[in-house]
Amino acid sequence: MTRYMTCLGLTALPLSALAALAPVHQNRHDLAVLVEFVQQHPEVLQSLRSIDLQQQVVHFGRDCVARFGRATVAEPRPGGAPALAFTSATCPVGPAEGVRGAAR
């Protein structure tokens, strides 16, 4: 009976409880996106001041900020949150260099 209740309890959990990546893995993915953005934009790299993982922003130049965010999804899906992506900047970031879906 105890096994049955445990199985029943596990199957009743929402998918979102099972889908999220551990914070260390999510942070690793997010940091890689931020660093790749900096590396692909020479003007940002040349004037880089800081990368704020918690706020999902890159500070560069003179009070410039590049913001990143996630697409909103109605239903959670396996594999964690949607990928972090460049959304806007308060200053021009210059042309992107590189080949892998560079933000412009």
Image (tube, grey):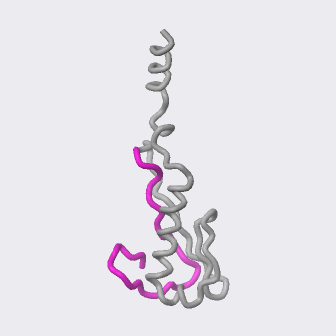
Q: Residue at x 58, y 79 (%)?
A: 90
Residue 66 picture location, percent across and down: 56, 75
Total numbered labels placed on residues in the image: 0
Q: From this viewpoint, which residue is outermost toward the right?
A: 63
Residue 9 picture location, percent across and down: 50, 22
The quadrant in which residue 40 appears is: bottom left
Q: Residue at x 47, y 38 (%)?
A: 18
| Depth check, front residue: 65 or 42 | 42
Q: Is residue 51 above or below residue 5?
A: below
Residue 71 picture location, percent across and down: 46, 57
Q: Residue at x 53, y 67 (%)?
A: 31
The quadrant in which residue 19 appears is: top left
Q: Is residue 20 above or below residue 42?
A: above
Q: From this viewpoint, which residue is outermost toward the top?
A: 1
The C terminus sits in image quarter = bottom left
Residue 59 picture location, percent across and down: 62, 78
Q: From this viewpoint, which residue is outermost toward the left?
A: 99
| Depth check, front residue: 74 or 78 | 78
The quadrant in which residue 49 appears is: bottom right
| Depth check, front residue: 104 or 42 | 42
Q: Residue at x 48, y 9 (%)?
A: 1
Q: Is residue 102 magenta?
A: yes
Q: Is residue 54 magenta?
A: no
Prevailing secondary structure of the magenta residues:
loop
Q: Which residues are magenta?
A: 78-104
